[in-house]
Image (cartoon, grey):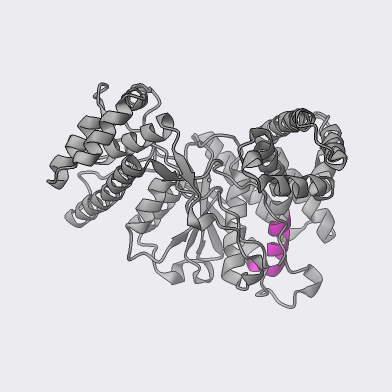
Amino acid sequence: MAAVVQTSEFQYYAGLDPFQRRLLYEPIVLKYAIIQSCNLAREEPESHATADFDNLQSDSEAFRVLVNKLAHVCDNERGGNSVTAMTILEGTNGPEFVLAANRKDEEETRATARFVTNLLQLAGQNPQNLSSDALEKRVLWMILAFNMPRITEYKDKLDKALGLCLEDHERRQSEDEALKSELQKLREKFNFSVNNIREQLINLIHNAQLAITGIKKAVRTKARSSEFLRSGPWCELKHYLGRWHSYRQAANVIVYAAAAWPLLFQDFKITSLPSSTRISKPIVQSDLTAVAIVQHMEAFEKVKMPELMQNAEDLRRIGLDKAIQIQLLRRTFRPIIHAEVLIHHYLTKNRITRPNRFWRQWQYIGASKPTCRLCHYYFSSHSQSQIQVRPSHLNLYPNWRLPEISDEDDTEAREAHRKLLKSIAEKVRNDAKRTLRHRTTKSKQYDSNTYSATPRFLVKRSELTNSDGPAYCEVDRCSR
């Protein structure tokens, strides 16, 4: 049932010549180094305003939530390697789920395909004819078992955050005994091994909403003040409470989606795309400076930039050039294709772009996390495409690359690739100039959700009247 599609042979620089590599990666390295070295003011991206759940009224919105949740439960390890993207096509005999991950090997890719197959079969077939709640519990355990590396780390991080919050509470000599009591009770509940107590783990997640309501209310209240916004332990607590609860939310969405759209869970096919290869380090000059990068931008745009030259010189004194050279010397500076781009490239190469090729004509590539800044530039440069993706958190990751171009591609494909590169490079260059000029950046502290609210618009099985009924659920609060 699961098929792995093979990619082309590895290309040293994915078809980019030295000028193209400099054009794209120098401004990326410059902006990233400014972020790392200059303590920039952070602006929240507009797309991360709190979602108005009461306005979620369409099947297509609920479908996007489902695809994002399915991708989320495939992203089973911390870090960027297992970030997963997914789209659902209208196959010959049923739906076709197309999956890709940032960087998984062949066995990990096959394991993910097996997991998705088993998950869809369990939710769709309910072989033991379980009640809705019991089925959700079974689905939750399957999700937790596959995500145990993340679960273990989330438990450790949450326990640490709870301890630090209790210390912070004592240090501030707060009189809020109710908050202290809630913190202590929750910490006691997390005092067990995730590997040995299956039922306790499930029950804790199922009851997490009740256990943390008081803490969430207190944290929200305190986080409104600038003092608490800058307080690391409370922000960490808020983040990991949301991550822990997100697995129950995913199980809930999947079970009720199976009731709303049973045909989506029947006669399906899984197509797993292999992750890309890493290209070699795109910039080999290890002594590159901010001034030199600005000079190269001046030469390309044929315009002088005295203000930016002065800013680059000023920032050199506080470590900007050192940050640039640290990035260039990293052995891990070997870019890959991100999962969303892998899927989009697969679709376009195979001319799967018309609405009727997608399940219910919903042209959407979901992902376990919001798109990064460079993926956002990639998709916004495809102005003719109707394929939608998650809103971006605008975080910048230098280890990003375009799909490769080879001598086997025709003239039209090579020209399209050249224009795409030029468009993305222009966006990155303008972004780097803006950051250098204003010393601010739009990004998120965390690249995953913080609080994940319980879905409000899921339709109960007893309320469903036909297979086309909507499974209304929340729109993800994006943060990658």
Check the image and report above or below for 175 versus 371.
above
Answer with left or right where residue 379 lies relative to residue 184: left
Q: Is residue 317 above or below residue 474?
A: above
Residue 11 vertical position relative to residue 451 in the rendered view, above or below: above
Q: Is residue 104 visible?
A: yes
Q: Depth check: give the residue in front, 87 or 448.
A: 448
Q: Is residue 355 left or right of residue 247?
A: left
The magenta-colored residue range is 252-263
Magenta stretch prevailing secondary structure: helix
Foreground of the two, 144 or 312? 312
| Spot occupied by residue 102 in the image (x, y as percentages of width and height) | 47, 40
- Outermost residue toward the bottom? 465
Name the residue at 44% across, 70% down. 355
User: Quick check: 166 left or right of 48?
Assistant: right
> Looking at the picture, how far across and down is residue 41, in whole percent?
46, 41
- Nearer to the camera, 145 or 36: 36
Count how many numbered circles sit on residues in the image.
0
Q: Quarter-wise, where is residue 304 in the image? A: top left
Does 217 appear in magenta?
no
Q: Is residue 458 left or right of residue 379?
A: right
The location of residue 362, given as percent across then percent down, is 50, 68
Depicted 317 relative to depicted 232: above or below = above
Q: Is residue 20 visible?
A: no
> Magenta span has 261?
yes
Residue 280: give x, y in percent of width and height: 31, 29
Name which residue lies at 45% across and 71% down: 356
